[in-house]
Amino acid sequence: MIARAVVRQLIESNLRRALERAEFALHYQPKLDLDSGTITGVEALLRWDHPEWGLVAPERVIHIAEECGLVVPLGRWVLREACAQAVRWRDSGVAPVSIAVNVSAMEFRNRDFFDHALAIFEATGADPACLQLELTESVLMRDVAASACLLAKSKAMGVEIAVDDFGTGYSSLSYLNKFPIDVLKIDQSFVRAIDGNASSNGAIVSAVIGMGRSLRQRVIAEGIENAAQLDFLKLHGCGEGQGYFFSRPIDAARMGTMLLARA
Ligand code: G
Ligand code: MN
């Protein structure tokens, strides 16, 4: 117990220091319109480059931050940085681009989430319409009434709502009508299954695409890694995609260059 407490303390103090010393960075991965190949937006992904430990996986960072109660300041840093980047890109001549930010459970449940987001938009001068919040099903379903209220307020401001890792969380579909959802992001695991060899592979992907169409929600396939997956997705009418096949997450400067080059 003592050893664990010491490790935790060590990680916690390192996280605090990282927030102060700007060891975090956001990298960006483009999302593409599968028909035209143009960039429809980017997803901001957290990177922690620790001076001694090297790159720490984002899932670990979030996990540790949740354990030591730092997830709220960390999430706030991510949102602020994404908004500041939107403004920097705008000022350097990049046409308005949607930036998606992942919101973790504890962050979303924090009472002040909305007010802080509002304050960040005001402080940075970013247009809320350029921001998309990615929430997982389990986060949305934990407190349906509270989620509905928060989503309505965010939507009213112009922020878009995406369901991340769709299909892996809560299996109730009734919420799809209750919440003002703009985008369904098909989880990578389903995309990976497309070019496997079971006859049912790809079935979930095509079902989600059909569902999104009926519900008038945009569908984005995550984790596209090869041409076979892309062909299948296009054939089944998937609107947008994201994955290593197009680009890995890249730093803001490289992303900016890519965005400037877009038609
Ligand atoms: O939970 P979420 O969907 O936000 O996770 C995104 C994660 O998936 C990021 O860590 C990102 O680097 C990773 N990722 C993005 N594209 C691909 C891909 O094509 N293949 C794999 N294996 N991972 C990807
Ligand atoms: Mn995501």
Image (tube, rainbow, N blue to C red):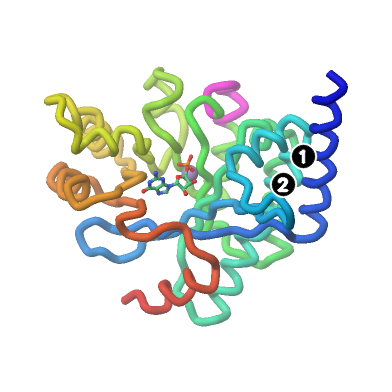
Could you say whether the residue bearing mark 1 is in a helix, strand or loop? loop
- Marker disc for residue 16: none
Q: Are marks 2 and 1 in contact (CB under 8 Å)?
A: yes
Image coords of residue 218 (percent x, y): 32, 45
Three-letter amino acid code of the residue under disc 1: Leu
Left or right: residue 29 versus residue 16 is left
Residue at 27% x, 33% y is 208
Identify the magenta region. 140-148
The verdict on residue 73 being magenta is: no
The residue that mark 1 highlights is 70
Residue at 15% x, 42% y is 236
Is the residue indicated by label 1 positioned so its CB lies within 8 Å of ligand 1?
no
Three-letter amino acid code of the residue under disc 2: Leu
Left or right: residue 37 versus residue 167 is left
Could you say whether the residue bearing mark 2 is in a helix, strand or loop? helix
Residue at 30% x, 55% y is 245
Q: Where ligand 1 lies, by quadrant?
A: top left
Q: Circle 1: is it few (<14), some (14-19), or many (20+) Cα within 10 Å?
A: many
- Marker disc for residue 74: 2
Asked whether residue 39 is in view, the answer is: yes
